[in-house]
Image (cartoon, rainbow, N blue to C red):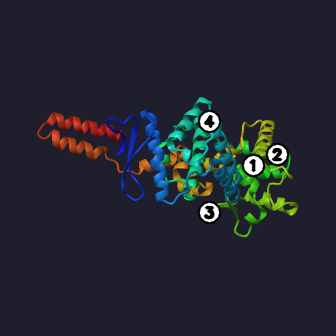
Amino acid sequence: MGVIKIKKAPTYYADYRDVTGKRRRISLQTKNKLVANLKYEELIRRRDAIKEKIHVNISWETFKDKLLNSISIEKSDNTVLRTKLAIRYFEEMKKPRFLQDVTPTLLQEFKEHLLTRGFGHSNINRILQAFKSVMHMGERWQYIPKQDWSIVKELKVPRGRIVFHTPEEIDKLLNACPSDTWRLVVLLGADAGLRRGEMINLRWEDVDFEHNQLYIAPNKTEYHRYVPMTESLRNALQSAKVGAESDFVVNFGRVRSKESLSSRYREIAKEAGVPSFLHKLRHTFASQLVQNGVELYTVSQLLGHRSIQMTEIYAHLAPASLHKAVFNLPKRGMQLVGMEEKAVCEGNKACKQIGVDFGDLMRK
């Protein structure tokens, strides 16, 4: 079954089974084999849609409006922004008429289009992830049949070098902060590992002084975590709460954007003479934990990583513990020499003497 050519027929035919399972042949009304294949794929897609009771020919605009309205209620602002950007970039390449027009093949073309525009590999991967989520939503709503979006592979991204601050640099940053609120920002990053969005959204109700921990809910999903407070962070929070005029811990008035937080922080770091960016504080939190012997799994839980693989970028910072682990292996040098002497040098005095000398050397 598929696209076939019938003798004496001027056009290509589709040989397929309809929704009832009956075998059929219909003319595809074209002499061009490439066009015939495209028509056949569309025919099969429509057939599958009918079999699964899926809506056929829902417009792209109708789906997009419903999607954006849905995620604005259920997802974080950051997710909404990434989704809007992914859709915008996709429409710049090709604005589909119907949702069914979007296929894995078209998504592959989209990836190649982004490469020609000069986007970095990490950025392209984030855009692809956001757009795949869009299409998965269409499948869940049964607007389109399920397709294998995983065939569009993400681009390889080299693992960069992790940068973090020394304790002396953190002290310089704290001393350069123009207000108690900015000192809180530095401590929330360096002593609790918060992302900038988590800093902005942290409320006083999330600060549990009784149990000495912060409740971090980075988005509107089920993912959340508890982070214990250091003495420095606890003292700073207690002082800030005395005169708090907002429900939010980090209060800069009406302006509450991550971009403004990042840009102002870079200015403060420059004044302190310490090259820094907000996420470097989070790297500092994780790096110092690993350097002090905390297991990667525990660090992963404190950072809110969804998989231990995300935390493995800090593994190289624990060389002492790795060396210690290797040194716990049993010493095998003498046993190996003895085995060689018995197996190879049996009855050979000269060879035995070499084995003994080598054993003496190993003991030195």
Residue 130 screen position, x and y as percent: 60, 47
Q: Which residue is mark 1?
A: 186
Q: Is the C-beta separation of discs 1 and 2 under 8 Å?
A: yes
Q: Which residue is mark 4?
A: 93
The secondary element bearing badge 1 is classed as helix
The disc, 2 or 4, on the residue closer to the chain's N-terminal end is 4
Amino acid found under the numbered disc labelled 1: Val
Camera-near label (3 vs 1) is: 3
Camera-near label (2 vs 4) is: 4
The secondary element bearing badge 3 is classed as loop
Camera-near label (3 vs 2) is: 3
Q: Is the C-beta separation of discs 3 and 4 under 8 Å?
A: no
Camera-near label (1 vs 4) is: 4
Residue nearer the viewer, 307 or 116: 116
Q: Which residue is mark 3?
A: 222
How packed is label 3: few (under 14 Cα within 10 Å), some, or many (20 or more)?
Answer: few
Quarter holding the C terminus is top left
How packed is label 4: few (under 14 Cα within 10 Å), some, or many (20 or more)?
Answer: few
Amino acid found under the numbered disc labelled 4: Met
Relative to 150, is 246 above or below?
below
The disc, 3 or 2, on the residue closer to the chain's N-terminal end is 2
Residue nearer the viewer, 93 or 327: 93
Name, please, the residue furthest toward the left. 347
The disc, 1 or 2, on the residue closer to the chain's N-terminal end is 2
How packed is label 1: few (under 14 Cα within 10 Å), some, or many (20 or more)?
Answer: many
